[in-house]
Image (cartoon, helix red, strand yellow):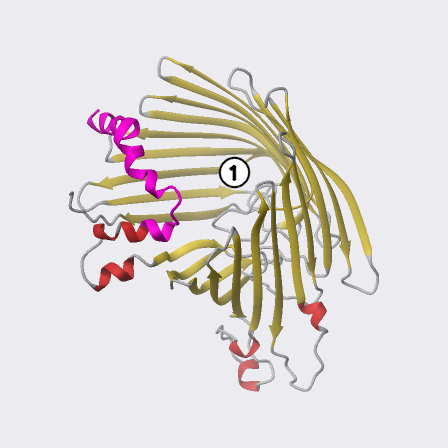
C-alpha cells in the first residue's frame, strides 16, 4: 500500500515535473545525469559506459547474416566510446544435424555502431567462425586421430554493413550487405566470383497517413557461395521477394493482412521459381473469443521433437497456424480456454517432413494455485532422418500444476501421457522449484524432467533425463537522496 501511494503521488504531481527535461535525451545523456547513483572513483565513469554485458548461455541478434538469434555459450560485451558504440562477443554454438550428429562451431565477432544522426543508423560487423570437428585431412597424423579441436586453418570470415533509417514519420528503410571469405585448401586454386559470395537484403515499411493501412516489402538475395553454417537457417543461392499489406476493420475488431511471396532458386545449372500468397487474420475483443488464422508460404519452423534440449536447425516450408481463446474472470478466479492448430510441411525435395498438431487447453488460476490441462493429437509425416521422441501418430494428455507458497518459494509439477495406435507409448514427469532469497538478493530455479517413450510396438523403451539450474543475482547500489 505504501508503494502504491508513493507511485500515485509521483505519477500525479512530482513525477512529470522532474522528468520533463529527460524526454528528449538519449539513453547516454540520461545515464550521465544518473552517475551520482554509482560508486565514486574510476568505476563510476567506466560503469556508466557499459551498454551490454552477457555471460553464459544467451541468444543474440545483430544482423540477418551474422548473429541472427542462435543460442550461444560464451561472453558478450558492449561499450559506449562516445563517437560510437562498440561490442565484442566470443563463444561456441552447436546444432544437431540432419543425420543426428552434433555440429559444433567456435565463433567470434565485433560490432561498431555509429551514433544515430537524424534517425539514421549505420553499423559495421565482423563475424568469424570455425567448425570444431573439421580436422586438416591433408595431414596423416590427423587422419588417424579421433580429435575434435577448432580448425582455425579453415576459418570463415564475414563482413557486414547494416543501415536503418526513417525517411519520414510514415516510411522506414533498412538494408544489409555481407560478404563471406573462406580460406581455400589450395592457395593457387581460383575461388568463386565475388557476387556469389555476397548476400544482401532491403526492406521497407510504410503507413498511409490518416488510415490504419500498413505496407511492407522485402527483397533478399543470398549468393550460392555465401557461407555461414552457424546461422539457424541460410537460403544460399536464392532470391526472395515479399510484398504485404495490413489493415484494421470494424473499429479495430478485425486485423487482416495479405502478402505476396516469390522465391527464386539458382543453386544448380537450372533456375526455378515459386510464387504463393499468404494471409494473417486476427480478432481483438475482450467480450468475444479471440481468433487468429494465418498461412505463411515460405517460413522456417521447428520439428515436433525439437526442444531447447535438442538444438536442431529449423526446416523450410509452409506453415498453417490457427488459434482461438476465451477468458472468464469471476470472484478472483480466472479460466482461460484455448484451441491451437498447427500444420507444417517442408518444400525441399531433400527433406520430406511434416507435422500436424491439434490441442485443446484449459487454464484455471485462483489465489496461489494455477493448473493447466491439455489434450490433443500429433501426426508426423516423413521424418525418417529426423530425431524422434514420439511415434508418428499419437494422442496426448498433459497436466501441470503450480503453487506459490509465499514470496519466497513456489513449486510446480507436471505429467504427460501419450497413446498410439498400438497402445500406451509415452510418459513424462517434470518438477520445478523457485526460491527467492531475501539476503543476498538472489533467485534460484531448479527444473527436472524424465521422459520414456516407445516409437513402435515391441521396440525397447528409451529414456531421456533433462534438468537445469538457474541462479540469478541482482546487484543493488543505493544512492544518496538530496
Residue at 57% across, 41% down: 169
In front of the other: 410 or 463: 410
- In this picture, is 65 found above or below 280? below
For this view, does 295 lie left or right of residue 478? right
Q: Residue at x 67, y 69 (%)?
A: 197
Q: Is residue 260 left or right of residue 60?
A: right
Magenta stretch encompasses residue 24: yes
Question: Crowding near pointer 1: few (<14 within 10 Å), some, many (20+)?
Answer: many
Q: Is residue 173 magenta?
A: no
The spot of residue 284 in percent (x, y) is 56, 23
Q: Nearer the viewer, residue 68 or 430?
A: 68
Vertical placement of residue 223 versus 288, above or below = below
473 or 252: nearer the viewer: 252
Callout count: 1
> Which residue is drawn at the image coordinates 34% and 25% (left, top)?
369
Kindly identify which residue carries mark 1. Answer: 426
Residue 231 visible, this angle: no
Quadrant (top left, top right, bottom left, bottom right) of the N terminus: top left
Residue 304 visible somewhere in the drawing: yes
Q: Give the quarter of the image for residue 230.
A: bottom right
- What range is drawn magenta here? 1-30
Left or right of 73, for residue 22: left
Quadrant including the C terminus: top left
- Position in image of residue 252 (x %, y %): 59, 23
| Predominant SS of the magenta segment | helix
Amino acid at each position: 500500500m505504501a508503494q502504491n501511494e508513493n507511485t500515485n503521488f509521483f505519477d500525479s504531481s512530482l513525477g512529470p515535473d522532474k522528468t520533463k527535461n529527460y524526454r528528449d535525451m538519449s539513453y547516454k545523456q540520461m545515464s550521465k545525469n544518473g552517475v551520482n547513483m554509482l560508486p565514486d572513483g574510476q568505476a563510476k565513469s567506466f560503469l556508466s559506459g557499459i551498454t551490454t554485458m552477457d555471460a553464459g548461455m544467451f541468444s543474440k541478434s545483430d544482423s540477418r547474416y551474422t548473429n541472427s538469434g542462435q543460442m550461444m555459450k560464451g561472453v558478450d560485451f558492449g561499450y559506449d566510446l562516445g563517437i560510437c558504440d562498440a561490442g565484442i562477443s566470443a563463444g561456441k554454438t552447436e546444432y544437431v544435424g540432419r543425420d543426428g550428429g552434433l555440429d559444433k562451431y567456435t565463433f567470434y565477432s565485433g560490432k561498431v555502431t555509429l551514433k544515430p544522426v537524424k534517425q539514421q543508423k549505420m553499423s559495421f560487423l565482423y563475424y568469424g567462425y570455425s567448425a570444431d570437428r573439421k580436422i586438416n585431412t591433408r595431414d596423416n597424423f590427423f587422419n588417424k586421430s579421433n580429435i575434435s579441436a577448432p580448425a582455425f586453418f579453415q576459418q570463415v570470415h564475414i563482413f557486414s554493413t547494416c543501415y536503418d533509417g526513417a525517411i519520414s514519420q510514415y516510411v522506414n528503410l533498412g538494408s544489409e550487405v555481407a560478404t563471406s571469405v573462406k580460406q581455400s585448401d589450395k592457395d593457387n586454386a581460383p575461388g568463386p566470383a565475388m557476387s556469389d559470395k555476397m548476400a544482401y537484403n532491403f526492406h521497407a515499411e510504410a503507413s498511409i497517413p490518416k488510415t490504419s493501412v500498413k505496407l511492407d516489402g522485402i527483397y533478399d538475395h543470398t549468393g550460392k557461395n555465401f557461407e555461414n553454417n552457424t546461422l539457424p537457417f541460410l537460403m544460399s543461392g536464392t532470391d526472395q521477394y515479399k510484398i504485404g499489406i495490413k489493415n484494421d476493420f470494424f473499429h479495430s475488431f478485425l486485423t487482416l493482412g495479405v502478402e505476396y511471396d516469390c522465391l527464386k532458386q539458382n543453386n544448380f545449372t537450372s533456375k526455378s521459381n515459386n510464387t504463393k500468397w499468404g494471409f494473417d487474420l486476427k480478432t481483438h475483443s475482450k467480450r468475444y473469443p479471440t481468433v487468429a488464422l494465418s498461412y505463411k508460404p515460405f517460413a522456417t519452423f521447428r520439428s515436433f521433437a525439437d526442444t531447447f534440449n535438442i538444438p536442431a536447425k529449423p526446416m523450410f516450408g509452409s506453415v498453417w497456424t490457427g488459434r482461438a481463446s476465451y477468458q472468464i474472470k469471476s470472484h478472483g478466479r480466472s479460466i482461460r480456454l484455448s484451441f491451437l492448430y498447427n500444420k507444417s510441411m517442408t518444400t525441399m525435395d531433400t527433406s520430406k517432413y511434416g507435422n500436424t498438431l491439434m490441442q485443446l487447453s484449459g487454464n484455471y488460476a485462483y489465489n496461489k494455485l494455477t493448473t493447466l490441462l491439455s489434450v490433443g493429437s500429433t501426426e508426423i509425416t516423413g521424418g525418417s532422418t529426423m530425431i524422434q521422441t514420439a511415434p508418428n501418430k499419437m494422442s496426448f494428455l498433459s497436466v501441470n500444476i503450480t503453487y506459490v507458497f509465499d514470496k519466497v518459494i513456489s513449486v510446480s509439477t507436471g505429467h504427460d501421457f501419450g497413446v498410439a495406435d498400438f497402445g500406451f507409448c509415452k510418459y513424462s514427469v517434470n518438477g520445478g522449484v523457485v526460491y527467492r532469497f531475501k539476503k543476498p538478493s538472489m533467485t534460484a530455479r531448479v527444473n527436472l524432467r524424465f521422459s520414456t517413450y516407445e516409437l513402435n510396438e515391441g521396440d525397447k523403451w528409451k529414456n531421456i533425463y533433462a534438468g537445469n539450474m538457474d541462479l540469478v543475482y541482482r546487484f543493488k547500489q543505493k544512492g544518496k537522496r538530496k
